[in-house]
Image (cartoon, rainbow, N blue to C red):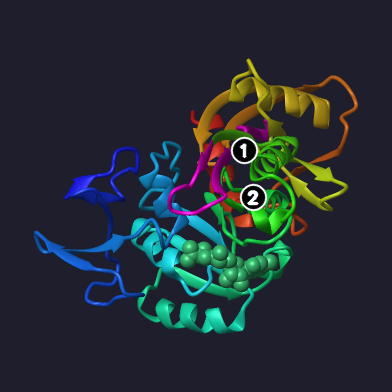
Amino acid sequence: MEDRTGTNGTVFCEKGRLYTKSYDPGRRVYSERLLSVAGSEYREWNPSRSKLAAYLATGGVSYPLNRGSKVLYLGAANGTTVSHVSDIVCDGTVYAVEFSPRSFRDLVRMSETRKNVNPLLADATNPSEYSFAVDKVDVVYSDVAQKNQADILADNMDMYGARFGMLCIKARSEDVAAKPEEVFEMSKRRLQERGLKVHEMRSLEPYEKDHVMIVAERPRTSYAVAFREDGRFMMVYHPRRKGWEMPGGKVESGESSADAAVRECLEESGYEVKVIAEKDIGYCDVCAVKVLEKVSDGEMESSFFDSIPDELSFDRAEYETVIPWARSEIFRD
Ligand SMILES: C[S@@+](CC[C@H](N)C(=O)[O-])C[C@H]1O[C@@H](n2cnc3c(N)ncnc32)[C@H](O)[C@@H]1O
């Protein structure tokens, strides 16, 4: 059994066939072949039954999954591909969204022994329907075979802060009359209009006719955890999101994450700041910064806090980690 190059040690090959290492040894999810090698069980992954396997079998190079990834999977059906994603992200989580109650029953059965699969009976066109169960994810994988596939992916990536998106486009689901190539180009353009960088658009032929897989990435963002000398930290109030958040935003081309945090602080709050430390938290960079002085009116209302306020735009748990980190970096001595 060899590693399939570029899959971070999560997908394997033998005699030209793909395999994943079973999360749930001894059990088949569909009629896949099981193989025992050196005390581990591997499940054959047929590219004609799974578009993610087809993407790898046709040479896909932008595979973003690893063992610890959190994946939001849209259009889980009865779990054929989800089961392999569960093998792949064995130390992570798969949130599997499906709106057909019949398929959902199979997903629930599978999740009884695959503890990293969380089945959600919900409509992927309305991502807030499952916000009670899903927090931030690393990757959104979408295979909903319905109209507006690009927007469904982008809406879910926005809502759940995903860095990567994988989108299976079935040309006929978008428009039965249009040429498949036009549909694919239109979907790619739409993702770019939504601010995503498209790394790869790969035809899944000969395994799936008139299908492509698009892999996209959200450009890097950066935010500042800004402390004043009195030990209080700054947040800005976002009127549309109706919550307090740390000043930050997109890293522009030619900028470092630290430059972006300084610029965003100034634009949003009117405060000049100095970067003390930086930290990569996966989907974005966080900078611990010292507040210097107010030099202009910011675009947003800003305030200094002793503790995290109740009304927040984003995840409290993340702030509970980054604020103590920034405090210890800034007040080291
Ligand atoms: C092509 S199948 C998915 C196959 C599956 N990804 C696999 O590889 O095993 C598309 C699935 O998406 C589901 N679906 C379509 N639109 C949806 C939506 N808006 N929300 C949730 N599920 C949806 C369908 O019920 C169907 O089960």
Task: Report whether 29 appears left or right of 17.
Answer: right
Corner quadrant of residue 302:
top right
How many numbered markers are drawn? 2
Q: Determine the residue positioned at 18% across, 49% down.
A: 15
Q: Which residue matches tag 1? A: 218
Which of the two residues, 329 or 138, is positioned nearer the viewer here? 138
Q: Estimate the x, y position of residue 4 in percent, counting from the top left.
A: 28, 43
Q: What segment is highlighted magenta in the picture?
A: 201-229
- Mark number for residue 7? none
- Look at the numbered discs 2 and 1 and tell me whether their residues touch, using CB distance below 8 Å: yes
Disc 1 is placed on an element classified as loop
Sort mark 2 into few (<14), some (14-19) or many (20+) by Cα contacts within 10 Å: many
Compared with residue 80, is residue 298 higher up or lower down, i.e. above or below?
above
Disc 2 under 8 Å from ligand 1? The reply is no
Question: In the orientation shown, which residue stands out farthest toward the top?
Answer: 254
At label 1, the amino acid type is Arg
Q: Distance between the residues labelled 2 and 1?
A: 8 Å
SS category of the residue bearing label 2? helix
Q: Locate residue 309, reporting x and y percent.
A: 74, 54
Quick one: label 2 or label 1, which is nearer the N terminus?
Answer: 2
User: Amino acid under label 2?
Assistant: Met
**Residue 261 horizontal/vertical position (percent):** 67, 27
Queried whether the magenta region covers residue 223, the answer comes back as: yes
- Tell me, yes or no, whether the highlighted magenta stretch contains residue 250: no
Q: Quadrant of ligand 1?
A: bottom right
Question: Is 250 above or below relative to 273?
Answer: below
Which residue is tagged 2? 157
Q: Which residue of the protein is positioned furthest toward the right in this rendering?
A: 297
Residue 290 in the image, given as x and y percentages of width and height: 65, 27
Camera-side residue of 28 and 203: 203
Residue at 41% across, 63% down: 49
What residue is rendered at 58% in x and 74% in y?
A: 120
